[in-house]
C-alpha cells in the first residue's frame, strides 16, 4: 500500500480529525448513556497514528499513512494481519490480533472518512 | 453539519455542568469554558494537550513546559552513534500553539494545590484548572547510588534525559582513546525505556567500529535479564563481534559505588572497573512535580487508576508517561503518547460528568542495532478485571532475513517521523 | 497551608479505604496451612519484624525481598528462626533461616520468584518462643518487554561469589556478607521447548560457619530465584575464618572460605 501525501492534504486531514473527534469519542451522541463497553474509535485511531500519522519524508514511507483509503480494502488488509502473520508483516500481526473484528471495521471506516 | 451541532451540544453541556476554573487568573481564562492544565511538554504531555484540543476544540488547554525546544530521548542513541544530528532531535511548540490552539506557557510548575485546583509556577503565577494532567517524566534518584550525584554526572554522564548530557557523552566518546573502554552502568527495573541501554550499547559500538576500532563496550547490569535480550545478544554478535560485553547481576554486574574522579566503579562483590568513558544510568523516580503534588507513593512513582490514569491519591489529577505506574506497559515514548489519547478522552468524560470510555493502549519499541538493522517489541493493552493487561503482542523473530531487519530499521525511522509529527506537528 | 486538611481527607479516603478492605480479610498466616502448623495455635505479633518488597514488580522471576528483624546481640529474645512464604505460588514455601546471635542483626536480602500477584508472608520465632509476622501484597505485572527465554539451563553449580567487609567495622559490630552462587534453581513447574516438564533441580541447603560454629543455616525452596542471592549480617568479635557451604538436590556441593578481620571500630 503506497500513497503520496502533500503538506496541504495533511493539514486538511488534521481538521477532519478534530471535527470527528468529539463524535468519535461517543461523548455527544449518547447523552446520558454509560458507554463503558466499547472502545471509542478515536481512542483506537490515536494508537494508529503513532506510526501511521504522517508521511513526513519525501521518499516512499515504509509505514503507509491511512487516511482516505477505501474502507473495504483497508478492512481486508487489517483482517489479513489479524488472522495470519504474512511475510511482509513486522509488528502489524502482533498488534491487530488484539482488536475485535468490529473494532477493525470501525477503524477502517474512520480512516476512510478522513481526507488524504 | 451534524457533527458541528453535536460538538456544540457537547460543549454547552460541559459549560453547564462544570465547576469552572478559579477566577482571576493571569491567563484570563473565560469563565464559560473548562480549563485543563497539562504539565510537561514531552511525549505524554504534548500529546495529551493536542488530543484534548482535537477531541474538544473549544476546551481551554494550557501546556506548561520550561524549554522552547524539546529534545527527544528516542533517537538520542542514534545521535551518539553518529546516525543523527543533535538538531534532528529537537521539536518546537509553535504548531501546537498556532494550529491546535494549545496555550503554551514557558515555565516550570513548582507546586500543585489540589484544594484550590491551582498549579503554581516558578515565577509565582497561579494557574487554575478543572482537571490537571502531569507528564513530567523522570528525575534521577541522586541518593540511590553511592558516589553518583549531580556533580559526578558532569564527569560520568547519564544522558538519560536528552540535552546537554547527551552532547557531553558524545564528546567524551569522541575524545576516547582508540583502544578505550566505554562502560555503562544499568539499573534494576523499573526505569525509563527498558531496551534503551542495550540499543545505546549497539550505537556506541557502531561509532567505535568506524572511529575507535580497538575500543570495547562493557555493560554492568543490576539485572539478570533484559528486554529483547536474545535479539540484542544475537545482533551485537552478528554486527559487532566481541566488542560488546554484558555482565548481569549474577555475574557481579550490580554497581554499588562510583568514583567519578578516578573513573572507577565498584560492584556488589567487590570488583573494581576503571574505564575511559563511564555512562551511569542511575535508578529513577517520577519527576519532581509529581512527588510535590502528592501523587507518588513510597516507590517514587505515581499509582494511577488503570482505566483513566487518574491519580489514586489526588482526585482530578491525572498522571501519564514515565511518571505513572503503568506496568505491564513499559516506560516508553510510544506508551506515553498512547496514554495521552486514553486520558484525554477520560478527562473529557469526567468534565462532562460521564463514565470514562473503555481504554485501549498500544506500544512498539524499535531498537537500532545498526543503521540498517532494527528489532522491535509490540503490545496492545486493555483493561481486564480492573487491571492493565497485554492482550496481544510479540517481538521480532530470532530467525529473520537481513531484509526483515532492514525493513524494521526503516519502520523505526518512519515511526520517529510520524510520532513527532503527531505530537509536535513538525 | 490551607490544603493540608483537604489532603488529609483525601489520604483517608484513598488510603484507609483499601486498608480497611485488607484488614477485613484474614491475615496471611491464617490463610496458609504451613504457617498455621508452624505457629501451632499461637498468634503472631506484628511489629519487630519488617519486610520490604516492591509494590509492583515488572518481573516476577526475580523480586528483591528485604527482611529487617532487628538486633540480635542486645535483645532479650533475639529472633532464632525465620520462614518466608508466597501465598500464591504453586509451592508457598520460599525460604527458611536459622540464626545465631553471632549475626548481630536479623537483616537479610534475597531475590524470590512470584508466579502472580500475591501476598508475601514472613514469620519469625524468637528465643522465647514468641512469633512475629509481617506481610505485604505485591502486584506482579509481568511485562512482555522483559520476558525471559524458556530455554532450560543445563549448567552445573557454578563458583560461589562472596563479599565480606574487610575489615568488619569493629568487634561485635555487624557488617554485611553477600553471597551468590550460579545455579538454575529449576522449579520443576515449567515446561521445556519439547512440552515436557523440566526436571526440578534446586539448591536446598546453605550454611555459614564462623570458626567452626554454624551462625546461619538456610533452607532454599524452588521460589528462591535462579542464582540464589543471600545477604546477611555478621558481627564477629575477633578475627577468624568464615566458611560458606551450598548443597543442591543432586548432592553436589560447593564451599568458600573467607578471612574475617575485625577493625579497631574507631
Ligand atoms: C536513550 C533513550 C532512548 C529512548 N528511546 C525510545 C524509543 O526509541 N521509543 C520509545 O517509545 N521510547 C524511548 N525512550 C523513552 C522515552 O524517552 C520516554 O518514555 C518518554 O520521554 C516519556 O514521556 P513523558 O512525557 O513521560 O516524559 P518526557 O518526554 O521526558 O517529558 C517530560 C517533560 O516534562 C517537563 N517537565 C518536567 N517537570 C516539569 C515541571 N515541573 N513543570 C513543567 N514542565 C516540566 C520536562 O521539561 C519535559 O519536557 C527512550 C529513552 C531514552 C533515555
Image (cartoon, coloured by chain):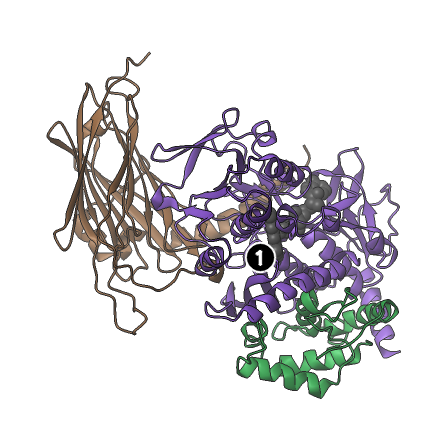
Chain colours: A green, B purple, C brown
Question: On screen, A74 above or below C157?
Answer: below
Q: Position of residue B37 (x, y in %)?
A: 75, 49
Q: Quadrant of residue C66?
A: top left
Question: On screen, C76 above or below A9?
Answer: above
Q: Is residue B131 visible?
A: yes
**Residue occupying image coordinates x 68% and y 49%:** B72
**Residue occupying image coordinates x 60% and y 75%:** A37
Relative placement, left or right, of B222 versus A109 is: left
Question: On screen, B268 above or below C196?
Answer: above
Quadrant location, the N terminus of chain B: bottom right
Report crowding for label 1: few under 14, some 14 to 19, many 20 or more residues within 10 A (C-alpha): many
B143 or C15: nearer the viewer: B143
Q: Position of residue B60 (x, y in %)?
A: 82, 55
Q: Quadrant of residue C162?
A: top left
B356 or C4: nearer the viewer: B356
Question: Mark 1 — on which chain does it sit?
Answer: B
Relative placement, left or right, of C114 versus B78 is: left
Q: How many marks?
A: 1
Question: On screen, C51 above or below C261?
Answer: below
Q: Position of residue B21 (x, y in %)?
A: 80, 49
Q: Position of residue A2 (x, y in %)?
A: 73, 78
Amino acid at each position: 500500500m503506497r500513497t503520496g501525501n502533500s503538506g496541504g492534504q495533511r493539514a486538511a486531514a488534521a481538521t477532519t480529525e478534530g471535527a470527528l473527534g468529539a463524535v468519535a469519542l461517543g461523548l455527544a451522541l449518547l447523552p446520558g448513556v454509560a458507554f463503558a463497553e466499547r472502545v471509542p474509535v478515536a481512542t483506537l485511531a490515536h494508537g494508529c497514528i503513532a506510526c501511521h500519522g504522517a508521511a513526513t519524508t519525501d521518499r516512499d514511507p515504509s509505514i503507509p499513512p491511512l487516511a482516505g483509503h477505501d474502507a473495504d480494502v483497508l478492512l481486508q488488509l487489517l483482517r489479513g494481519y489479524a488472522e495470519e502473520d504474512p511475510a511482509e508483516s513486522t509488528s502489524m500481526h502482533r498488534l491487530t490480533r488484539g482488536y475485535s473484528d468490529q473494532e477493525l471495521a470501525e477503524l477502517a471506516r474512520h480512516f476512510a472518512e478522513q481526507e488524504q | 453539519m451534524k457533527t458541528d451541532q453535536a460538538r456544540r451540544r457537547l460543549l454547552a453541556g460541559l459549560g453547564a455542568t462544570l465547576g469552572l476554573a478559579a477566577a482571576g487568573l493571569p491567563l484570563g481564562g473565560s469563565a464559560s469554558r473548562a480549563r485543563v492544565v497539562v504539565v510537561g511538554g514531552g511525549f505524554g504531555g504534548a500529546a495529551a494537550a493536542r488530543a484534548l484540543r482535537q477531541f474538544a476544540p473549544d476546551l481551554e488547554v494550557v501546556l506548561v513546559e520550561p524549554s522552547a525546544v524539546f529534545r527527544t530521548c528516542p533517537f538520542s542513541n542514534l545521535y551518539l552513534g553518529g546516525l543523527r544530528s543533535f538538531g534532528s532531535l529537537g521539536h518546537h511548540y509553535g504548531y501546537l500553539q498556532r494550529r491546535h490552539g494549545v496555550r503554551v506557557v514557558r515555565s516550570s510548575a513548582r507546586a500543585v494545590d489540589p484544594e484550590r485546583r491551582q498549579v503554581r509556577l516558578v515565577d509565582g503565577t497561579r494557574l487554575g484548572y478543572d482537571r490537571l494532567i502531569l507528564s513530567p517524566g523522570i528525575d534521577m534518584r541522586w541518593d540511590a547510588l553511592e558516589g553518583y550525584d549531580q556533580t559526578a554526572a558532569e564527569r560520568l554522564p547519564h544522558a538519560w534525559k536528552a540535552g546537554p548530557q547527551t552532547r557531553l557523552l558524545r564528546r567524551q566518546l569522541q575524545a576516547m582513546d582508540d583502544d578505550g573502554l566505554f562502560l555503562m552502568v544499568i539499573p534494576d527495573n523499573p526505569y525509563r525505556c527498558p531496551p534503551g541501554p542495550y540499543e545505546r550499547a549497539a550505537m556506541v559500538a557502531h561509532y567505535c567500529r568506524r572511529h575507535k576500532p580497538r575500543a570495547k563496550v562493557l555493560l554492568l547490569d543490576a539485572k539478570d535479564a533484559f528486554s529483547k535480550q536474545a535479539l540484542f545478544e544475537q545482533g551485537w554478535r552478528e554486527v559487532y563481534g566481541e566488542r560488546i560485553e554484558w555482565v548481569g547481576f549474577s555475574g557481579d554486574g550490580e554497581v554499588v559505588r562510583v568514583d567519578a574522579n578516578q573513573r572507577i566503579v565498584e560492584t556488589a562483590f567487590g570488583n573494581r572497573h576503571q574505564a575511559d568513558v563511564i555512562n551511569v544510568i542511575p535508578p529513577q523516580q517520577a519527576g519532581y512535580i509529581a512527588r510535590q503534588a502528592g501523587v507518588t507513593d513510597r516507590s517514587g512513582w505515581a499509582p494511577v487508576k488503570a482505566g483513566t490514569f487518574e491519580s489514586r491519591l489526588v482526585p482530578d489529577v491525572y498522571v501519564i508517561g514515565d511518571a505513572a505506574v503503568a506496568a505491564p506497559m513499559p516506560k516508553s515514548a510510544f506508551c506515553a503518547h498512547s496514554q495521552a489519547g486514553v486520558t484525554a478522552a477520560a478527562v473529557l468524560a469526567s468534565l462532562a460528568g460521564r463514565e470514562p470510555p473503555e481504554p485501549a493502549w498500544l506500544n512498539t519499541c524499535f531498537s537500532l542495532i545498526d543503521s540498517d538493522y532494527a528489532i522491535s517489541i509490540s503490545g496492545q493493552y486493555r483493561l481486564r478485571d480492573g487491571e492493565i493487561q497485554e492482550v496481544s503482542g510479540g517481538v521480532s523473530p530470532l530467525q529473520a532475513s537481513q531484509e526483515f531487519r532492514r525493513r524494521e530499521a526503516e519502520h523505526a525511522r518512519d515511526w520517529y517521523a510520524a510520532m513527532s509529527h503527531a505530537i509536535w506537528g513538525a | 497551608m490551607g490544603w493540608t486538611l483537604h489532603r488529609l481527607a483525601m489520604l483517608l479516603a484513598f488510603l484507609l479505604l483499601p486498608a480497611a478492605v485488607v484488614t477485613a480479610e484474614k491475615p496471611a498466616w491464617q490463610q496458609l496451612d504451613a504457617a498455621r502448623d508452624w505457629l501451632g495455635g499461637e498468634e503472631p505479633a506484628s511489629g519487630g519484624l519488617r519486610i520490604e518488597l516492591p509494590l509492583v514488580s515488572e518481573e516476577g522471576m526475580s523480586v528483591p525481598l528485604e527482611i529487617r528483624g532487628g538486633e540480635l546481640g542486645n535483645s532479650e529474645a533475639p529472633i532464632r528462626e525465620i520462614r518466608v512464604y508466597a501465598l500464591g505460588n504453586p509451592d508457598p514455601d520460599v525460604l527458611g533461616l536459622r540464626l545465631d546471635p553471632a549475626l548481630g542483626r536479623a537483616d537479610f536480602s534475597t531475590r524470590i520468584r512470584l508466579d502472580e500477584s500475591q501476598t508475601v508472608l514472613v514469620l519469625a520465632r524468637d528465643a522465647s518462643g514468641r512469633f512475629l509476622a509481617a506481610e505485604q501484597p505485591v502486584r506482579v505485572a509481568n511485562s512482555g518487554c522483559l520476558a525471559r527465554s524458556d530455554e532450560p539451563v543445563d549448567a552445573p553449580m557454578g563458583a560461589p561469589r562472596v563479599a565480606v567487609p574487610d575489615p568488619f567495622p569493629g568487634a561485635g559490630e555487624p557488617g554485611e556478607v553477600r553471597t551468590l552462587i550460579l545455579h538454575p534453581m529449576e522449579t520443576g513447574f515449567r515446561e521445556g521447548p519439547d512440552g515436557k516438564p523440566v526436571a526440578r533441580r534446586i539448591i536446598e541447603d546453605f550454611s555459614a560457619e564462623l570458626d567452626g560454629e554454624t551462625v546461619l543455616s538456610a533452607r532454599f525452596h524452588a521460589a528462591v530465584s535462579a542464582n540464589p542471592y543471600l545477604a546477611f549480617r555478621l558481627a564477629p568479635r575477633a578475627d577468624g575464618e568464615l566458611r560458606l557451604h551450598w548443597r543442591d538436590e543432586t548432592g553436589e556441593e560447593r564451599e568458600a572460605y573467607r578471612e574475617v578481620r575485625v577493625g579497631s571500630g574507631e
